[in-house]
Amino acid sequence: DAKTTQPNSMESNEEEPVHLPCNHSTISGTDYIHWYRQLPSQGPEYVIHGLTSNVNNRMASLAIAEDRKSSTLILHRATLRDAAVYYCILSDLPNTGNQFYFGTGTSLTVIP
Amino acid sequence: DTAVSQTPKYLVTQMGNDKSIKCEQNLGHDTMYWYKQDSKKFLKIMFSYNNKELIINETVPNRFSPKSPDKAHLNLHINSLELGDSAVYFCASSQGQLNFSPLHFGNGTRLTVT
């Protein structure tokens, strides 16, 4: 399985944008990039996913490098409720959950 | 309404006991999973069921036995509990194998084996 590398932790000030990086240099042509986050004492929740093009949804934006070897999750205005561990995961579709291997993720601290 | 619910939320038991964790989803999904999150926060898939049939079974001791009475339920039974089984267990569900469907997780069951 292609691996992802993320910083262990990041900090952001409240109401400022946050850019969470993910390196996946061994990504295959059919791998989708998924982002999940896990708030304290909760299960992970889906944030966004993409293949080649940048993606936007109500939660975040996903910027994918042209060579697809890296991606960045963008939270446009961090709130205290965004403090969580963010996981970047690669997986072929359609076998999504069967191939989900969560790494250590990035622990995001939001400073008031 | 809770989409994926697990019971109990906390489970404290002694070594050697047998225990079960229940999971129910009301999303109409046909695929359910069990994940284990250890003390280092690594989240690892254990089992995957599609339409009540086992699809994936990672290297999990056979003391762990999932049971799916119907598509909405996937229970996890653990025999002869060991200290190393202490972890948070998450149930999840998704729809189908052909199109993208995000995973929906429950809030976890924290198992402590003493």
Image (cartoon, grey):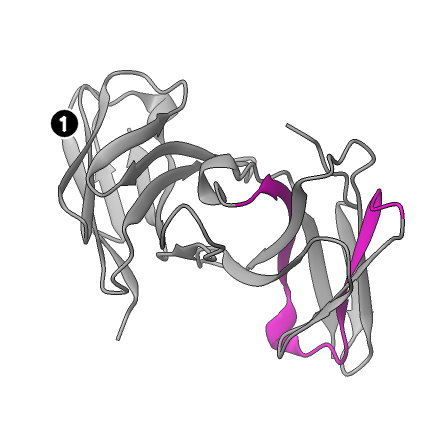
Q: Which residue is mark 1?
A: B18
Determine which quarter of the picture holds residue A54.
bottom right
Determine which quarter of the picture holds residue A11.
bottom right
**Can see residue A39?**
no
Report the span colored magenta: A67-93
Is residue A90 magenta-colored? Answer: yes
Q: Position of residue B26 (x, y in %)?
A: 23, 64
Crowd class of label 1 (few under 14; some 14 to 19; many from 20; radius 10 Å): some
> Which secondary structure, mark 1?
loop
Q: Position of residue B89 (x, y in %)?
A: 35, 42
Q: Using the image, determine if residue A63 lies above or below residue A13.
A: above
Q: Using the image, determine if residue B102 lies above or below residue A4.
A: below
Residue sticking out furthest to the front: B98
- Residue drawn at x 45%, y 37% is A98
- Residue drawn at x 22%, y 34% is B53
Is residue B90 magenta-colored? Answer: no
**Does residue B84 appear left or right of residue A88 in this picture?**
left
**Can see residue B105?**
yes
- For badge 1, the amino acid type reads Asp
Residue sticking out furthest to the right: A66
Determine which quarter of the picture holds residue A79.
bottom right
**Does residue A55 appear left or right of residue A68 in this picture?**
left
Q: Using the image, determine if residue B48 lies above or below residue A61.
A: above
Residue sticking out furthest to the left: B69
Seen from the viewer's position, the closer of residues A29 and B14 is A29
- Residue drawn at x 30%, y 66% is B3
Q: Position of residue B17 (x, y in %)?
A: 15, 25
Q: Quadrant of the N terminus of chain B?
A: bottom left
Q: Quadrant of the C terminus of chain B?
A: top left
> Which of the chains bears the disc numbered 1?
B
